[in-house]
């Protein structure tokens, strides 16, 4: 239970960290929740989208993705996106 609460809190503050780490304007980050936590459209707020980030926040030490998240990662990496 404790780890679940910490995970939920981390998901809410993650955009503050992500803005610096990914150099993305906070207005360009959208919370999805599941199966991926966030999607960020770098440059969108300035009218010049240049990159899309799929972001999954992990608070566990392993940082392991779920099977569904791995499947999504594989789709993105194999460019099966429309």
Image: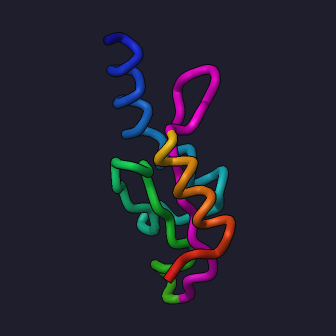
Q: Check residue 62 for magenta coloring.
A: yes
Quadrant of residue 43 in the image?
bottom right
Q: Check residue 59 for magenta coloring.
A: yes
In this view of the protein, which residue sits in the foreground, 44 or 79? 79
**How many marks on residues?**
0
Measured along the vertical axis of the image, is residue 40 above or below residue 4?
A: below
- Give the side of residue 4 with respect to residue 67, left or right: left
The residue furthest top is 2
Q: Quadrant of the N terminus?
A: top left
Give the percent coordinates (x, y) of residue 10: 43, 32
Magenta residues, dominant SS class: loop
Question: Residue shown at 54%/53% (left/top)?
Answer: 71
- Give the side of residue 19 with respect to residue 33, left or right: right
- Give the side of residue 31 with respect to residue 17, left or right: left
Tell me where the magenta segment starts and ends, as one range. Answer: 48-66
Name the colour scheme: rainbow
Give the percent coordinates (x, y) of residue 56: 51, 46
Question: Residue shown at 55%/83% (left/top)?
Answer: 49
Give the percent coordinates (x, y) of residue 67: 51, 41
In this view of the protein, which residue sits in the foreground, 45 or 33? 33
Give the percent coordinates (x, y) of residue 2: 36, 11
Measured along the vertical axis of the image, is residue 30 above or below residue 2?
A: below
Question: Residue shown at 35%/30% (left/top)?
Answer: 8
Question: Residue shown at 46%/78% (left/top)?
Answer: 45
């Amino acid at each position: 239970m404790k780890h679940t609460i910490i995970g939920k809190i981390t998901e809410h503050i993650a955009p503050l960290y992500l803005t610096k780490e990914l150099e993305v304007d906070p207005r360009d980050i959208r919370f999805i929740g599941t199966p991926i936590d966030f999607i960020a459209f770098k440059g969108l707020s300035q009218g010049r989208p240049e990159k899309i980030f799929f972001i999954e926040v992990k608070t566990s030490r392993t940082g392991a993705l779920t099977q569904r998240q791995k499947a999504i990662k594989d789709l993105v990496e194999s460019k099966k996106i429309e």
